[in-house]
Amino acid sequence: MSRTVYVNGSYLPEEEATVSVFDRGFLMADGVYEVTTVIDGKLIDFDGHFTRLQRSLTELDITNPMDRDAWLEVHRQLVAQNGLDQGMIYLQVTRGAPGDRDFIFPDPETTAPTVVLFTQSNPALVDSPKAKKGIKVIAIEDIRWGRRDIKTVQLLYPSMGKMMAIKAGCDDAWMVQDGAVTEGTSNNAYIIKDGRIITRALSNDILHGITRAAVLRFAREAQMQVEERNFTLEEAKAADEAFVTSASTFVMPVVEIDGATLGAGVPGPLALRLREIYIEESRKAAL
Amino acid sequence: MSRTVYVNGSYLPEEEATVSVFDRGFLMADGVYEVTTVIDGKLIDFDGHFTRLQRSLTELDITNPMDRDAWLEVHRQLVAQNGLDQGMIYLQVTRGAPGDRDFIFPDPETTAPTVVLFTQSNPALVDSPKAKKGIKVIAIEDIRWGRRDIKTVQLLYPSMGKMMAIKAGCDDAWMVQDGAVTEGTSNNAYIIKDGRIITRALSNDILHGITRAAVLRFAREAQMQVEERNFTLEEAKAADEAFVTSASTFVMPVVEIDGATLGAGVPGPLALRLREIYIEESRKAAL
């Protein structure tokens, strides 16, 4: 069965879901996105994603085309129309299609933002085989632009990094800048040493993960020690445990970093405990 | 009259020129482009652009969907069908639309690259009012990714830079990294001091301009001194002349850099002479 996709106010069969070739998302990567996870047909941390979307749009001087309740309604419609039980809702907003190509922003009075949303079903999100085994990551240089805090669609390098990882027989890549790990290709990165959870502090260098914020809050509530600071690749390779967080992987244990096996090479107890807490608490608060 | 646009083998009215929302150009900026100038209905340096397109695609592991002659034929068809006398042909190739979103590249056996081309008419390219007055540039920090030699559609920051320039009452922005000028938002940057033309050497830091290559060749043939090396913003502000080059602006004199007026604040003689030579020689060699 064909998915139903939302494009600029219409619910369409996915084969008919198109945008103009003049869309600035297509021509200039002038757009932002969010991915919200669905469990039991309900949205995880919808308001966190809505708030970050608003921030990304503000940073790029794009007016948010819908208010919170309108966004929520589209999300729920897509869940219902696609019978989505477990998976993700992807949303993208671009500066729109002004009818020609120009580095100068189009007049927002005449060019409305483009809005696209679609579902991705994934019944194995919660009961993930990967989370039981843990993932392996390689290290690559972080050569992305300087505003990774804005969730833009400039994902070419993260996508290339993912391919480098796969070619190396691994699952993902951790990016390293001036010796310190920034983040994974589509997730925030953490190490655990002597019971302390260490992750890079928020800045323009990394995405301000919605799942990151929730996981750190749950960790502190569970009396775990959290240090928000830079950590080096060498530190990571000598860690007791490691994990990544993202909307769609929750807390995903990392068992190998750039060739170095962590501990016994299996998911660590703190990472697994955090995954459990995160899923449990998120389910309770889902909309 | 509506333009005729080329999309994946079809010549379509521009209103019908669309791509899938799953196109990796739209979702991940996973695509490259070229802009070829048309004068007198003929293509300027077609082979230079074709060669660079091939290089960009190779760097991204995308198979070139057409050979030189097929590309030339589409360019000529668009010129003919749109009655283009003076202007540009924009072309974009993306990794295609695999039908879903994934950081992992789609299998090229089942997902073909997307090809889009369209014309932009501009009767004032050669006889440009801006070239007679010269342009003013501001300086901004260069925060783009580390592979600017690949002509990708990741143009959000250059577009933001253009807007910063316009808000400052200027025409364009020169980007500065570690104190040295890299390039303009969509052009290569040059200063002239004591008769010597100075421009940054080729590396991953800048676009390998097709117009840059031609202009430097013409300059050397005309016995002008050329130095390919980094230059600082301070050096630029103290230059005798300055200019930028790009396919669509040829050689464009710069008369003000970050608030400092160069010389008498009018286009310099060497820049104007280079513009003349470039246009004359390019017209002769046009296809």
Image (spheres, coloured by chain):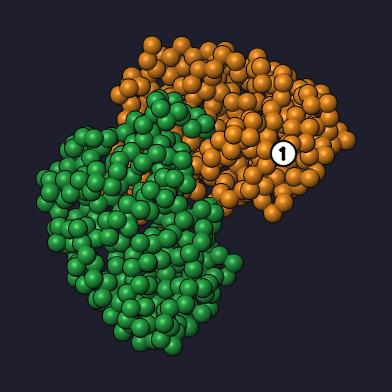
Chain colours: A green, B orange
Quarter in which the C terminus of chain B is drawn: top right
Can residue A91 be seen here? The reply is yes
Is A218 situated above or below A114? below
Is B195 situated above or below B95? above
Q: Residue at x 39, y 17 (%)?
A: B3
Is A22 situated above or below A242? above
Q: Position of residue B120 (x, y in %)?
A: 48, 21
Question: Which residue type does callout 1 highlight?
Answer: Asp
Closer to the camera, A113 or A4? A113
State the residue position of label 1.
B258
| Label 1 element class | loop
Q: Chain of mark 1?
A: B
Q: Position of residue B160 (x, y in %)?
A: 54, 40
Asked whether, in this view, residue B62 is left or right of residue B40, the answer is left
Q: Residue at x 37, y 66 (%)?
A: A213
Q: Position of residue A6 (x, y in %)?
A: 23, 40
Quarter in which the N terminus of chain B is drawn: top left
Q: Residue at x 64, y 38 (%)?
A: B173
Q: Position of residue B76 (x, y in %)?
A: 46, 19
The image quarter in which residue A13 lies: top left
